[in-house]
Image (tube, rainbow, N blue to C red):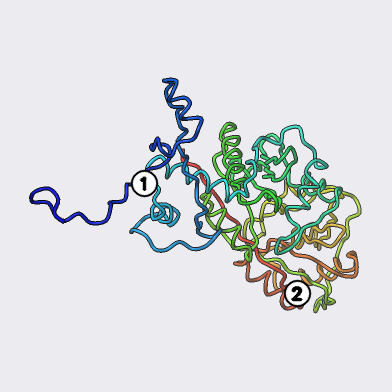
Amino acid sequence: MLGRAGAAPAGPARRRRRLHRRHDPAAAGAAWRARAARGLPRRRQRRHRRRLPVLPIPGCLGAAAPGRRGENPRDTVLRRAGWRGRGLCQARAVHRFRRAGGRRAVKIASLAGLAPDDIHPCFLDAFSDYLVPAQPSLPQLAAMLRRRGWIPELSAGAWLDGRLAGFWLCAAPEIDGEREGYCIAAGVSPAARRRRALTDMAGLVGRLLAAHGIRRQRLEVIDGNQRARDAYASLGFEPLRKLDCYQLQAPVQAACRWPVTIHTAHDPARWPAPDALAYPPAVPNRRESLLRADPPLRWLSVDRDGQTLGSLLMSPDGEVAELQVSPPCRRQGIASQLLQAAQSLSVCGRLGFNNVDSRDLPLLSLLLRHQAVYRLSQWEMTLSAPR
């Protein structure tokens, strides 16, 4: 059967194009038809908001596929998911929120007005899973902070849900005629990590130091803690030197006999100047730190004709803070005689040597000759702010 002139034969009835019910009066509900019968405008429909999909994040939910050259892998994933412009910025914010665990960010502020007992619980939590877990008692922590010269006004803390969850404990010793900011310890509790707490605390400490005219910073980090080293390197710290730690427990055999004087009175004014040291001591072993030690250090010396040939400073628990021998009197058994006398004063004859410069070959050969055991190494790192 033919239709209109020139028209093709009529086929099956063409199916009417199906519209969304918002645009199709025939598919509208009773409420809409009632409003149309009364001549009322149709109620404005709310626009559908695009829901943010769960996209993989590098290092969190999965690895992103390779993207454009020089493009952030996170942006590659978002771009391939169809995000553009303002939506891309919104998706980035969502991912930052998810990477932080979906919880509130930490609050960064100065530690002014806080005492060691306020820091102690967070200190134990922050160092509980470290390569060398540090779990000092409250008196031990207070003594360490006092010896290092902790300044709460120049230190920063991170609070999460009203509780201290991170700290950057800072001192300001004078080194080579210039005050420096020394990081005694820095750590973040496991529950508050991956929230930029360390970066934000470092930024606040830098501003506090700059307000006092201090532009140089220094810290130590354990050699095996690569994650911490990378974190400090990202803040601008550069490695300066390597410091080794040893423990001496085997009985020291001295080949020569030298009279050792064990001074009972605490008289730092009589201590010899640290001029015979081959390399500058680390901040915990500098004289201003040793003078603040509590309990006071013991002093042992080898004297002849009113001159001090060798000197050793040690803590009651066996930490050798300083060992020096006059250069003309070296390789004559004076250092070994001092170590032998120090072992008699230490508990179980155990002596500890911390922060030994790895370039100090004479001291290292002395320790190894007496069967000292290597414990660990630290990197001393420095940061200089632009003038």
Relative placement, left or right, of 32 versus 117 is: left
Q: Amino acid at mark 2?
A: Ala
Give the crowd class for mark 2: few <14, some 14-19, many >=20 residues within 10 Å.
Answer: many
Disc 2 secondary structure class: loop
User: Which disc is residue 287 wearing?
Assistant: none
User: Which disc is residue 18 wearing?
Assistant: 1
Q: Is residue 142 above or below residue 303?
A: above
Answer with the quarter of the image where residue 339 lies. bottom right
In the image, 82 versus 63, the foreground residue is 82
On the image, the x and y values in percent for residue 303 come to 81, 61
Q: Is residue 94 above or below residue 247?
A: above
Answer with the quarter of the image where residue 239 lies. bottom right
On the image, the x and y values in percent for residue 271 come to 78, 51
Relative placement, left or right, of 247 versus 177 is: right
Count numbered badges in the picture. Answer: 2
Relative placement, left or right, of 85 versus 93 is: left
Answer with mark 1 or mark 2, whichever residue precedes in sequence: 1
Disc 1 secondary structure class: loop
**Pointer 1 with pointer 2, Cβ within 8 A:** no
Q: Residue at x 76, y 78 (%)?
A: 371
Report the residue marked by disc 2: 372
In the image, 142 versus 18, the foreground residue is 18
Q: Amino acid at mark 1?
A: Arg
On the image, the x and y values in percent for residue 312 come to 79, 60
Viewport quadrant of the N terminus: bottom left
Answer with the quarter of the image where residue 372 lies. bottom right
Q: Residue at x 40, y 39 (%)?
A: 86
In the image, 145 versus 6, the foreground residue is 6
In the image, 68 versus 132, the foreground residue is 68
